[in-house]
Image: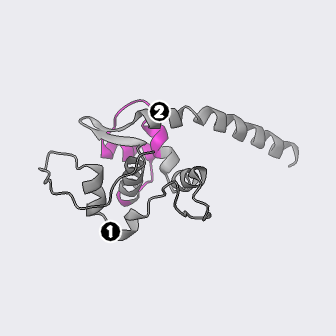
Amino acid sequence: MRSVPLRKSKRKTTSNEVPSETELLDQNPPEMTRIPRPGKPVRGSDTGRPIMALLDLLGRRWALRVVWELRDGPLSFRDTQARCGAISSSVLNDRLTELRAAGIVEAGEHGYQLTGEGRELLALYPALDAWAERWASRERRFS
């Protein structure tokens, strides 16, 4: 995952332009700069291990769902919100900011879309689904 510097950008955007990741982070409150990063302590772990940062990022409300909903191609903010159902605009904005900073999602001219790294992450979902199905099967046997 690539690192996004947290410095002020000198470039100004027009109302039609999508701000860069750096500009987006500059516009958000300080708590938004606590995006999980490999090599840094994250919620639940002080080790800095990359897997722990990824689990922190993907464990945030709606993060996995946002990635899933972008699987078929770009979506506008409103379309992403509609596909996710009950997600608030502020939570969606937070998740998109975090996923963009992690290099999983990018803003293109047709809306938000998965990056190459995001598509590779999405390719791991079937393995997680298979594990979850085995878990559910074990639970049904013992219930």
> Is 109 situated left or right of 135 in this image?
left
Q: Secondary structure at mark 2?
A: helix
Q: Position of residue 36 (x, y in %)?
A: 48, 58
Compared to residue 75, the image places residue 55 above or below, namely below
> Is 130 situated left or right of 66 in this image?
right
* Residue 70 image-quadrant placement: top left
> Is 123 situated left or right of 100 in this image?
right
Q: Which of the two residues, 28 or 78, is positioned nearer the viewer here? A: 28
**Label 2 belongs to which residue?**
119
Q: Earlier in the sequence, mark 2 or mark 1?
A: 1
**Label 1 belongs to which residue?**
29
Q: Position of residue 4 (x, y in %)?
A: 35, 52
> Is 98 situated left or right of 16 in this image?
right
Residue 69 magenta: yes
Residue 95 magenta: no
Q: Furthest residue to the front? A: 39
Q: Amino acid at mark 2?
A: Arg
Q: Secondary structure at mark 1?
A: loop
Residue at x-position 69% and y-position 34%: 130
Mark 1 crowdedness (10 Å alpha carbons): few <14, some 14-19, many ≥20: few
Q: Furthest residue to the right? A: 142
Q: Amino acid at mark 1?
A: Pro
* Residue 113 image-quadrant placement: top left
**Residue span colored magenta:** 66-90
